[in-house]
Image (cartoon, rainbow, N blue to C red):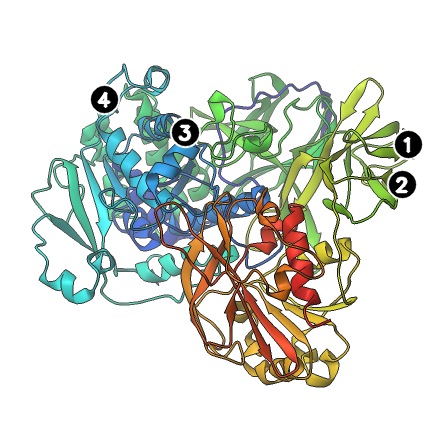
Amino acid sequence: MLKKIHVLLLFFVAGFTISFAQQPAKPTASELYHNLQKVNFLGSALYIAAHPDDENTRLISYLANDLKARTAYLSLTRGDGGQNLIGPEIRELLGVIRTQELLAARRTDGGQQLFTRANDFGYSKHPDETLAIWNKEEVLSDVVRAIRKFKPDVIVNRFNHRNPGSTHGHHTSSAMLSVEAFDLLNDATKYPASAETYGTWQPKRLFFNTSWWFYGSRENFEKADKSNLVEVQTGNYYPQLGLSNGEIASLSRSMHKSQGFGSTGSRGAQTEYLEFLKGDFPDDNTNIFDGINTTWSRLEGGAAIGAILNPLAENFNFKNPSAMLPDLIKAYDLVKNLKDTHWRAIKLKQLETLILDCGGIFLEAAANTNAVNPNGSYDVTLEAINRSEFPVVVTGIKSKDGSVLLALNETLAPNEKKEFELTIEKASTKISAPYWLNEQGTLGMYKAPEAMIGMPETPTPEQLIFDIQIQTTKLNVVRDVVYKYTDPVKGEVYQPLEILPAVTSSIPEKVLIFSSEASREIPVIVTAGRDNITGTVTLQHPKGWIVSPSQGVFNIKAKGQAQTLKFTVTPPKNQSEGALTSLVQLGDQYFESELITIDYDHIPYQRVLLPSQAKVVRIGIEKKGENIGYIEGAGDAIPQSLKEIGYNVTTISPDAITASNLKQFDAVVVGIRAYNTVPELAFKQTALNSYVENGGTLLLQYNTAHRMVTKDIAPYSITLSRDRVTDEFSDVSILAPKHTVLNSPNKITQADFEGWVQERGLYFPSEWDDAFTPILGMNDKGYSETKGSLLVAPFGKGHYIYTGLSFFRELPAGVPGAYRLFANLLSIGK
């Protein structure tokens, strides 16, 4: 049955969904039983830490799957300041990836995901620095807001709030803010906006998820007084899921692929320790919910609901879950009358999902496109099928604001699919890109609309409501409008339907280095977001720079097609920095966004809108040598940066690392964390050393000492450490002022260390052979000077260089001094 109707639809964004690009869940009978058990548990737990991958997935999985508690992880940041082992994305784009990795982890371990507006600005050595950069009051407000909204009975901190300076400042800050928030939550005068919206709240107790690591050794932990600890057994096996808790936890942790956190599943007994901090200590020190009523009797009117649902769980019908529909419907009707609005909303949603899944009732709204412009139109196919013997009637389709789009009275006969088609004439006006990137924030804080603070991602822009009736009970089932297609390899692929601009533009090279007064031709790529667009592009530029022509004209026939316009850019005579911005005019509208896609198999397809800009830098820079070989590591943008200053860069595959092949290069650069991510390097050091011995220059960028494919990374002994300098403004001392790398072909001065971003460097060596010369000294305030950031050693006729300086951040950011220093390193011996 196929019906087509044209309607005018105005959507309003409200609420949020967990990843709207996933295939619909299709649970087995065992999973339905598991979900019913969760319906019958009325307790909540909140885990709090600083970053993606900080969370203890073993404990989160235990809470969600063993206790069946409603469980969430509050990550104060999105991990923007970390490194990326799977691709070149850093900063904001890495934050998007790590946000989605957290959501993928929660889909795996059964938890939910929350955030604050705090920006991961990079490693911090002390919470005083962290809280100053973050804006403590705003982040504390967000923590209070998250707790009041989620209403946990129990809070668990990942980190110790009592040892500032002993670990990452973000870590300690997350615990400090949680402890402070605990005492403010029930006071309506503290952060009154969230108190008015969500009410006050007082969790029963607060814990710190301790372990032997926090005691310095297993031996110290064994000797410690544990009277203040709660011990929970987290190694249990779940027959209905076919997995041990440790196996679920490893699958969840392995979602943090950008951080290289793949984990092997564990089986057998495991214990987690929770140190009691605040609230009421449980009488049973093996049960964090001890003394908290987690049954239906917790709620006024709940006992009658429990009397229906508890027997269903005890006598679950695995062969025919749909036989339970009458009782599930009866419970649903009773839940609608609960006075407790918090639990009412949660349990109505859980029961609605359980009713649909037990009945095999599938409802879907699929668009004919994956993107539409604000106020644009699209077609949508609605599918409804009832795969039970229980009668189900579709009574209508509505918009999110309640407007009736299609009045129906369609009985869904068993296993008979019905389809309807609609044309949505006017979609949402809200752009669907990550909401926290829509406005320029600060170094430590993102900006977000009040209603979206804490949401893991931008709310789904387009939704439809299926009105269905089972017996006399009406369900209003909200479905995100999705886009799906068949991939010849992956099969059925789901993507979100997104609201995107009518046109976007990009300047392909994000940093343009001008080492002379010579002009360069700069392309601007304009991409159509709809059919038949004609407009102009203006390349806005800094004072003193010249751009011609002043305006370019484009004419694009089909959505998705692109046209390249070329502009000639001439720099000033003297050193200068600024930005080129591509401004597109389409009629009376202006657009200055670039559309960036992120596509990895382990997370949903992402599209991000950022300003269409490129940094332009006029610097005086000299270099020696022309041909650079680059051995890729975890992924960075150094090769393109080197091309910007005139080098010919060739990527060297692992099998091409031979002494004879390397001879063609004036210098060879090894990418970040290559010795952590490229297994073949375990067998290539002899060839690399031979290259240096015969006159080559080999430059290794930072690696970590953990999980190296070989410790033999240099012709001399060198020991990597966790030493780092996180303050990008920290003083730099010149330890070897006469060394070639500081004098030729560019004279390096203190001015060359100005304008660095995020940090000076990381994972510096702590010990090295006397053959190495340490070039620079640096330290964060209050810490002793480190000298391992840049080490140079002669070997045979050539030179070996190891550096932990963050060139992988500085060069893509267009830092002039970093370019000059890097050129000197590549020029040594020439």
Indicate the secondary structure of the residue bearing disc 3.
loop
Provide the residue designation for mark 1: 552
| Rendered location of residue 407, percent (x, y) | 62, 20
Q: CA distance from mark 2 to mark 3?
A: 43 Å
Indicate the secondary structure of the residue bearing disc 4.
loop
Q: For marks 4 and 1, give the one nearer the viewer.
A: 1
- Residue type beneath disc 2: Lys
| Rendered location of residue 528, percent (x, y) | 81, 35
- Residue type beneath disc 4: Asn
Say if 533 sits above or below 723 in the image. above
Residue at 22% over, 23% down = 301
Q: CA distance from mark 2 to mark 1?
A: 8 Å
Provide the residue designation for mark 4: 186
Quarter of the image with the C terminus in it? bottom right
Provide the residue designation for mark 3: 135
* Res 566 label: 2
For marks 2 and 4, the one nearer the N-term is: 4
Relative depth, front residue between 18 and 724: 724
- Residue type beneath disc 3: Asn
For marks 4 and 1, the one nearer the N-term is: 4
Indicate the secondary structure of the residue bearing disc 1.
strand
Relative depth, front residue between 791 and 362: 791
For marks 2 and 1, the one nearer the N-term is: 1
Mark 2 and mark 1 residues within 8 Å of each other at the beta carbon: yes
Residue 48 sits in which quadrant? top left
